[in-house]
Image (cartoon, grey):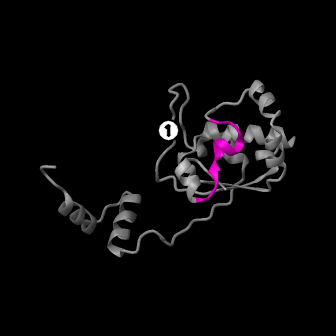
Amino acid sequence: STASTGIAATHLSGQTINSWAGIGIKKLITDTDLRELMKRRYLHDRFRNTDVLVIDEVSMLSSHTLEAVDTVLRAFRKNDSPFGGVQVILCGDFFQLPPISENSKLDASFIFKSSLWEALDLKVCYLDKPFRQTDERFLHMLSDIRNNAISKSTWLTLKERFLQNF
């Protein structure tokens, strides 16, 4: 299992997708990069033995990184299917944190803006049971905010918490 961030990866006892794919902090993979990566025996073994790739916290994964991983897997597996034919399971919530980029020349866009997104022919599974929260009032407020439809009760609750002189 992999994730877009180190913290999320540790929660899965996995590693970051960048580390797993051998791309490090690169967002774009050149032919020279691929030739260097091809010299790494452990990557050949890793990718040959991978049937399913799980990537968690995909809201923070940029389209460039997703495409870089795809490029690497296609090359190593000598398969022009998306991700070299590896089944990909993407987990995350696009209402959470967006991708960031340290390089202002590269737009840190969501993975669903990548041309690869359509090629993946994804099957979407929505999880609708909350696991982290049990307070019904709080869950209602979160739902209102997520749906951009603030109810009067949510507004009043938030207004109660507003500290004028904070």
Query: Of 35 and 143, which appears nearest the observer?
Result: 35
Q: Position of residue 40 (x, y in %)?
A: 80, 36
The number of discs equals: 1
Q: Which part of the image, by quadrant, shows the N terminus?
A: bottom right
Q: Which residue shows up at 80% across the image and 47% down it?
A: 47
Q: Is residue 133 magenta?
A: no
Measured as percent of width and height from the top left, residue 17 is found at 65, 46
Q: Residue at x 33, y 66 (%)?
A: 141
Q: Is residue 55 above or below residue 136?
A: above
Give the residue drawn at x 80%, y 41%. 74
Q: Residue furthest right?
A: 78
- Image quarter for residue 62? top right
Q: Quadrant of residue 106?
A: top right
User: Is 84 above or below relative to 95?
Assistant: above
Q: Residue at x 59, y 53 (%)?
A: 9
Against 30, residue 161 (above or below) is below
Nearest the viewer among 17 and 159 is 17
Q: Which residues are magenta?
A: 12-24
The foreground one among 52 and 118 is: 52
- The image shows residue 158 at horizontal and vertical percentages of 24, 61
Please determine whether, in this image, residue 150 is positioned above or below residue 117.
Answer: below
Q: Position of residue 70 (x, y in %)?
A: 73, 41
For numbered disc 1, what is the local secondary structure? loop
Report the amino acid beneath label 1.
Ile
**Residue 16: in magenta span:** yes
Q: Is residue 38 left or right of residue 18?
A: right
Horizontally, residue 158 falls left or right of residue 51, namely left
**Residue topped by disc 1:** 100
Q: Residues within 10 Å of mark 1 (few under 14, many from 20)?
A: some
Q: Is residue 80 visible?
A: no
Q: Nearer the viewer, residue 68 or 9?
A: 9
